[in-house]
Image (cartoon, grey):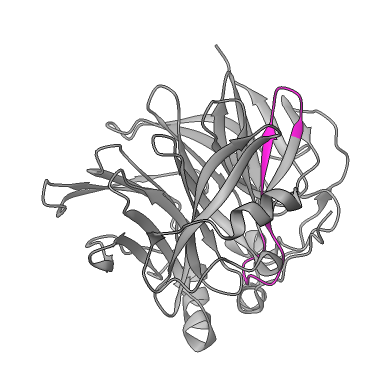
Amino acid sequence: MQHRAMRRNAYGALLALALGCGTEPETIVACEAGDDIVPVCSFENPEDLAVLPGGNWIVVSQFGGVEGGGTGSLVAFRPADGRSRHLFPASDPEEASTHADVETGWGAADCPGPPDPERFAPHGIDLDRRNHRLAVVNHGEREAVELFEVGRTSRGPALVWRGCVPVPDGAWANDVALLPDGSFLLTKTLARAGLDRAVSMAGIVLGRETGHVYRWTPEEGFREIPQSRGSGPNGIAVTSSGRDIYFAEWSASRLVRLRLDEQGEVVDRDVVDLPHHPDNITWTRDGNLLVTGQKGPIGEVLACGGTEEGVCALPFSVVRVGPASLDVEVLLEHDPPTTHGAGTVALQFGDELLIGTFDGDRIGRFELAD
């Protein structure tokens, strides 16, 4: 098992203490079902989830930490029988050596080469099942979006690294959403380092603008999408047409929708308040949005991180949002937390939700009501 400790963000901790709102959260160690959540306790900070092609496995982004100091990984998990296998770094040395010299060509021309498996720190992910392309935000030895092709072996799913796109200097990214033409959207939550980082963290605590949404294309590189600035942009999702963009404004506790015209220009901006600090966004089978987020003062959320056993006992909720109406319905409110905590993502898998966390050892399984 990997070492699960994540570096705490010193700026965030100091700011939280200065504002008198940061208290050390408790942990939930017992791996027992409760409050309609069944935990599966064999993971290391399963921050984001996506269903793999075929529909039997999911890919799990095991978060390496906000500073990229921890070691993370991508694993495949089969809910039907609880089986899991490492995808990157690969659990099978033969697979790793087979894929090491594969022809690349995806991403940016200035990609310096494959990520260092020993310093890999994944965060937000997105999977385009139409072309088996997986995009992963990496905070490891570099800040980049790593691009993998999803394949299959006799042992189960496998990943082939195909290229990367270095994130603009000074930006700390969070989540990514793939577009059919090979481009993608990326949220910049805050600045990456130094004084700019400290200023951004202060903005997070105070609810001020700290970041925005980028669009990357092979032809133009990164450009900021107009009207996408917000306080702590986090999770992001996009319709298959690429015309409607949804992103979570984490510290402002709201969801933003941008509508684009055929030329890609923003023609409408709508905002809806949410009952939590929204993190990742996923699509349901019937075309609604699931938005998961943490509850409580921002300082208490920032105090999570570094849990060595169990999961941070931070309340969270899951809401369903209609993409057209922006109506909000609470599906799950785990407050006070007794089984799971610090929820970051809810993924529909069959008739249940699989719920991840940024600071813990478990994925929660929650059966959806009929």
Query: Extreme top residue here?
Result: 370
Q: Is residue 314 visible?
A: no
Q: Is residue 211 visible?
A: yes
Q: Verify whether residue 122 appears in magenta.
A: no
Q: State the residue at coordinates (69%, 72%).
A: 69
Residue 342: x %, y % from top left: 67, 49
In depth, the one of 189 and 295 nearer the eye is: 189
Residue 35: x %, y % from top left: 74, 27
Q: State the residue at coordinates (58%, 16%).
A: 369
Q: Is residue 198 shown above or below 87?
A: below
Lateral position of residue 288 relative to residue 37, left or right: left
Magenta range? 64-83
Q: State the residue at coordinates (12%, 47%).
A: 261
Q: Is residue 365 shown above or below 307?
A: above
In depth, the one of 316 and 264 nearer the eye is: 264
Q: State the residue at coordinates (58%, 18%).
A: 351
Q: Verify whether residue 65 appears in magenta.
A: yes
Total label count? 0
In depth, the one of 146 and 330 nearer the eye is: 146
